[in-house]
DNA sequence: TTAGGGTTAG
């Protein structure tokens, strides 16, 4: 159907009639000029089809402007209210008009204006336009209004693949990954084919889904991708690498990456990030070097992952080189890069350098503040972490859930129980934030470490949400420190149900039994571990010597200096034994002769790294080590004595925190 | 019209 509307009256150049919804034509209003330059001819073409609206209003005015140009110009300048006033003046807004306004509502993050635009759009007969439905879904998604997203999706009858894709994206962003997969099945049942965009959203939905079978679903989508011939698609393959990375399937990710026929900076960065995040920092740095050898220049995103890898390795010299590169390439004004630098320096033991980067930041977002809070935390400066936390609030930055995890973690490392409790209580009272499982886990850790195990158990009992594996894991960890067998058995029973394949839980329980000399129980847990085909994560320590990073493992046959290392450790051990060192053989999980247990203890990766540092570093140079697990009691007391005996400063960062050994004392005050 | 990688914690 064609509708030819009456041409506008020439009186449009006169002042507007008084019935206009807004008094927008005050001379100071930015819309004033636009209004008077607008002279549409308003020929509107539309069809009755529910899928197509060809509505056009393209005529330039005498002044070289048309209506949509005016709307666009107002939107660009951020004058959304005025653009809306203009909308109500126009008898024939077009699809383009609404597209511009929807975009502007998203940018201005204004739900009230969004609702106005949406209502007017329906009144003007665009309610079934799939193009605009897609835009509306994106808009409501950005405004965090998932119910409005659902409403738009429910109402639109012509659901093009664009509409489905936008809906999947919105649901995923809102954390409803599980639902995406249900709708995907529905979409398949009614015979709508996916396109390349659908697969990337489906994969992201698998990651967002909290179901225990998310990985399997991801693999299923991978199968669909292969069946539909997208296995060479750059974006889909990159997303797939990221999905496997997030599930910790480094092997799968690496296979895909190496089989990709075409790679770009994003795919390289995704793989580097996968290694950095999954305990393979050396591989991350190696891949970064390889990428650079192809003259592919890293961007800020790549640099963040590489800095993470340096942080994991405590590779200070490498980190400094990267900092130089970041400055040369002008990436030192990008907030995530600066936050990553703060963390890198702190995790490499150079807290002061991290603080310097933090102090020089012109602008600080909550992540930057959190980086600094956790940096003080891992170094054991709990009071300082609380001070930074308070300073952040004074500066007007609202704490995020991670700010609380960081500051509570800092209290935990420093044994600040009362302060931690107070901060925990302030979450709801002062910041209107309900504690999550992570926060409860921090509280259990705080109380547990401080040997208030029963109080920690009561916290779990009174939780308003289901205690997850993190909470029970914290309790089990505390039972390990204070050797509480009864509570450990309770915690591990739950953990074995919740995380049947996490080897770490079985090892912790076996450690507790070993410490209590309950050898039959140790054997039982070990058998359970073997029956499930699980393996203890092997301990490994990294050390940087003359800008090169070395990895030492307890069963190390790769290092050419291994014999020299063993000999040095044996000598040191014998000499220190004469000066009071007693090997803590109780932590060895096997019921062996004392001598054999001592030999096992001397083979711990952290001691090998210390010896390697003593052999290869210059005299007096600080030894910096990073370890993938928690430092064991024996390595801790051994390193304390070595620092005194060899007059060396030794920095060891374990999975939890920093240990700064000097003159026979550790900065953690033996509380870790 | 839609798309891929990143920052903070335990």
Image (spheres, rainbow, N blue to C red):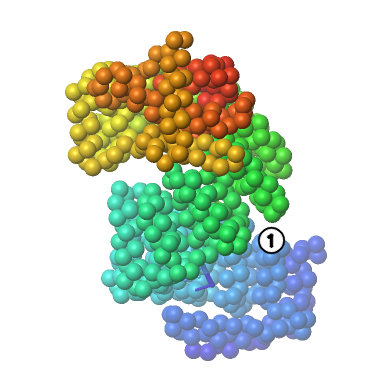
Q: Is residue A665 left or right of residue A447?
A: right
Indicate the position of residue A604 as horizontal and vertical percent values: 40, 29
Q: Residue furthest right?
A: A27
Indicate the position of residue A79 as horizontal and vertical percent values: 69, 62
Q: In this view, does A431 lie to the left or right of A231?
A: right
Indicate the position of residue A548 as horizontal and vertical percent values: 56, 42
Using the image, determine if residue A434 lies above or below residue A192. Answer: above
Residue A458 in view in this figure = no
Residue A548 in view in this figure = yes
Using the image, determine if residue A107 lies above or below residue A161. Answer: above
- Rendered residue at 49%/89% (across/down): A1
Indicate the position of residue A479 as horizontal and vertical percent values: 34, 22
- Rendered residue at 43%/80% (across/down): A50
Q: Is residue A373 left or right of residue A190?
A: right
> What residue sits right under mark 1 in the picture?
A78
Label 1 element class: loop
Foreground pick, A156 / A144: A144
Q: In which quarter of the image is residue A526?
A: top left
Q: In which quarter of the image is residue A387?
A: top right
Using the image, determine if residue A239 lies above or below residue A374. Answer: below
Tally of numbered tags: 1
């Amino acid at each position: 159907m064609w509708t030819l509307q009456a041409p506008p009256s020439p009186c449009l150049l006169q002042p507007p009639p008084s019935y206009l919804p807004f008094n927008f034509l005050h001379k100071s209003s930015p819309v004033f000029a636009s209004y008077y330059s607008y002279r549409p001819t308003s020929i509107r073409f539309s069809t009755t089809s529910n899928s197509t609206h060809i509505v056009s209003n393209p005529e330039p005015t005498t002044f070289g402007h048309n209506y949509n140009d005016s709307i666009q110009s107002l939107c660009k300048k951020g004058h959304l209210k005025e653009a809306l006033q203009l909308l109500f003046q126009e008898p024939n807004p077009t699809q383009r008009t609404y597209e511009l306004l929807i975009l502007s509502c998203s940018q201005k993050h204004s739900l009230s204006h969004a609702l106005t635009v949406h209502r007017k759009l329906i009144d003007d007969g665009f309610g079934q336009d799939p193009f605009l439905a897609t835009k509306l879904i994106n808009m409501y998604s950005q405004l965090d209004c998932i119910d409005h997203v659902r409403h738009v999706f429910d109402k639109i009858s012509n659901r093009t693949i664009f509409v489905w894709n936008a809906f999947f994206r919105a649901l995923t962003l809102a954390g409803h990954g599980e639902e995406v997969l249900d709708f995907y099945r529905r979409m398949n049942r009614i015979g709508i084919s996916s396109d390349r965009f659908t697969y990337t959203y489906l994969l992201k939905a698998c990651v967002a889904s909290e179901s225990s079978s998310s990985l399997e679903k991801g693999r299923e989508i991978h199968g669909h991708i292969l069946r539909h011939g997208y296995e060479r698609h750059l974006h889909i393959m990159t997303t797939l690498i990221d999905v496997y990375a997030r599930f910790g399937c480094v092997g799968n990710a690496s296979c895909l990456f190496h089989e990709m026929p075409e790679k770009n900076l994003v795919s390289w960065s995704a793989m580097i990030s996968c290694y950095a995040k999954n305990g393979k920092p050396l591989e991350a740095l190696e891949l970064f070097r390889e990428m650079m050898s192809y003259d592919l220049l890293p961007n800020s995103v790549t640099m963040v992952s590489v800095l993470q890898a340096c942080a994991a390795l405590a590779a200070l010299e490498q980190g400094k080189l990267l900092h130089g590169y970041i400055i040369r390439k002008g990436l030192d004004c990008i907030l995530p890069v600066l936050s990553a630098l703060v963390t890198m320096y702190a995790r490499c033991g150079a807290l002061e350098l991290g603080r310097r980067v933090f102090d020089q930041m012109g602008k600080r977002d909550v992540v930057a503040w959190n980086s600094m809070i956790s940096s003080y935390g891992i170094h054991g400066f709990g009071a300082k972490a609380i001070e930074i936390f308070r300073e952040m609030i004074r500066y007007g930055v609202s704490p995020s859930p991670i700010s609380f995890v960081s500051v509570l973690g800092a209290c935990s490392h420093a044994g600040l129980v009362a302060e931690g409790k107070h901060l925990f209580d302030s979450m709801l009272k002062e910041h209107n934030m309900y504690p999550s499982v992570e926060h409860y886990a921090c509280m259990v850790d705080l109380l547990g470490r401080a040997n208030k195990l029963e109080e920690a158990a009561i916290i779990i009992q009174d939780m308003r949400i289901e205690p997850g594996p993190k909470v029970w894991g914290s309790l089990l960890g505390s039972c390990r420190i204070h050797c509480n067998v009864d509570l450990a058995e309770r915690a591990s029973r739950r953990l074995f149900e919740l995380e049947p394949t996490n080897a770490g839980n079985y090892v912790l329980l076996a450690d507790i039994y070993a410490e209590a000399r309950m050898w039959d129980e140790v054997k039982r847990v070990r058998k359970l571990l073997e029956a499930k085909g699980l393996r203890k994560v092997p301990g490994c320590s990294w050390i940087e010597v003359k800008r090169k990073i070395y990895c030492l493992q307890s069963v190390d046959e790769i290092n050419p200096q291994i014999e020299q290392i063993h000999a040095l450790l044996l000598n040191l051990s014998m000499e220190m034994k004469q000066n009071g060192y007693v090997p803590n053989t109780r932590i060895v999980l096997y019921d062996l002769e004392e001598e054999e247990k001592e030999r096992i203890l001397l083979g711990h990766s952290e001691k090998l790294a210390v010896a390697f540092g003593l052999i290869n570093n210059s005299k007096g140079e600080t030894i910096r080590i990073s370890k993938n697990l928690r430092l064991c009691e024996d390595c801790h007391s051994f390193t304390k004595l070595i620092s005194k005996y060899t007059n060396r400063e030794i920095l060891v960062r374990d999975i939890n925190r920093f240990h700064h050994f000097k003159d026979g004392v550790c900065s953690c005050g033996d509380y870790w």
